[in-house]
Image: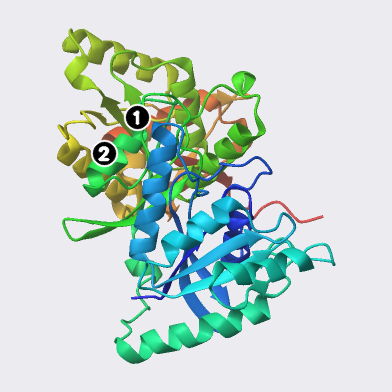
Amino acid sequence: MKFRLAILGRPNVGKSTLFNRLCGSREAIVDSAPGVTRDRRFGNASLGDLRFEVIDTAGFEKTPEGKTESAMQKQTHLAISDADAVLLVVDARAGITPIDHHFAELLQKVSIPVLLVANKCEGKIGIAGLYEGFELGFGEPIGISAEHGEGLADLYKIIQPLISLKKETAEEPNDCVDKEDNSPLQMAIVGRPNVGKSTLLNKLLQEERVITGPEPGVTRDAISVDWNWQGERIKLFDTAGLRRRSRVKEKIEQLSGADTFRAIKFAHVAVIVLDGTVMAERQDLTIAEHIVDEGRAIIIAVNKWDLVNDRVMALNKLTDRLERSLPQVRRVPIVTMSALTGGGIDRLMLAVKNAFGIWTIRLPTGPLNRWLHDIIDQHPPPLSKGRRLRLRYITQVKARPPTFAVFASRPSEFPESYRRYLINSLRETFGLDGVPIRLNLRGGKNPYVKES
């Protein structure tokens, strides 16, 4: 078990900036507006030769104003209970505030070490705030600048003994589990705002892992969680809802959307959650097209199915619209479910596992070429400039998604309609439902043409 460090503090002191600095990437959304972070976010951090896990948390408010703020504070308390040590961050430029004092009083009661860090110490303007940190009762504060990477050597000195102590008191398990052949299935939960994505994640994990609410836009960061389902290692991504670009005005929503697209890019299977009372809208199909362009396996999860009255008509309407509007991926698996009650969850996960198997499939060359010969007999390639186009050979060049190379005469002259016909026949013959198929036509070298 890795050493786990929770980063806590009031809003807008630079917790997410420090989180990104320790993780070496822009994993958490950062903005000058307070309250951007809402859910706990876990990341793998490195500091010199130290390797540990960090938890980014929501800014701590003395008196939460609403249901979302109360849930954010609950997530912060859960982060403390999960951690081996707490990194309390204060703003050296603003000095110590009453909220910092209130937070410090709460942390005096915890049984794990509390390390005090004064952020924004670049230049001389933060010196006064740095020395004010002594009054919180956690010893000498460490002055850093998370944005510029200053003071990390001093941070190393206070974290290193804690990690060494944990290694001495507990056996460290083998960390070599992230090999390519044993990497977890990565599953992204995507969709429009307020369709039940976070509720689905919480139901899968059987805990209140992320904040949910009736208002749209509660989730901002793409939260990743490691999970185990029936012995299968799965990395889940809960993402922010995606609205049409013309409706996105605020900078934070733009950053959330970019975070969602990044989660899709790294996923193996993307589950599009639909509101069963509304069914597929244009934006749902736009999201699906983006997933197909990224080459990811796709599942349609129709949520709130218990609220749908005419279920047969609703399913027929959805299937017909997918066939017409998403011809690149035929027979997309559709799973009806209720994230609130848990109905259909097992069927959803079986569909995800099956889609992942299709997405990673490798087809032998022999059956592929027998299929190609049958296709040529049934529906030969068309004529071009009075001469018959020819298909010679096919092989699968890669998986994830299934990608094929067909060697042909004059490949640039093949019409797109015939290429689509080949893809659809491949899908039907070999059962490649719900995944994009890449088919590239390649030309062979003509031995009778001399090179210039």
Q: Nearer the viewer, residue 116 or 180?
A: 116
> Image quadrant for the C terminus?
bottom right
- Residue 434 in view: no
In the figure, residue 364 lies in which quadrant? bottom left
Query: Is residue 106 rendered to the left or right of residue 335?
Result: right
Using the image, tell me which numbered label, if any, was put on residue 431. Answer: 2
Q: Position of residue 382 (x, y in %)?
A: 50, 25
Q: Position of residue 177 (x, y in %)?
A: 35, 73
Query: Is residue 408 rendered to the left or right of residue 308?
Result: right
| Three-letter amino acid code at the position of disc 2 | Gly
In the figure, 248 relative to 221: above or below?
A: above
Distance between mark 2 and mark 1 Cα atoms: 24 Å
- Residue 424 in view: yes
Residue position marked by numbered label 1 in the rendering: 273
Using the image, tell me which numbered label, if any, was put on residue 144. Answer: none
| Three-letter amino acid code at the position of disc 1 | Val
In the figure, residue 308 lies in which quadrant? top left
Residue lying at 33% horizontally and 16% vertically, measured from the top left: 279
Lower sequence index among marks 2 and 1: 1
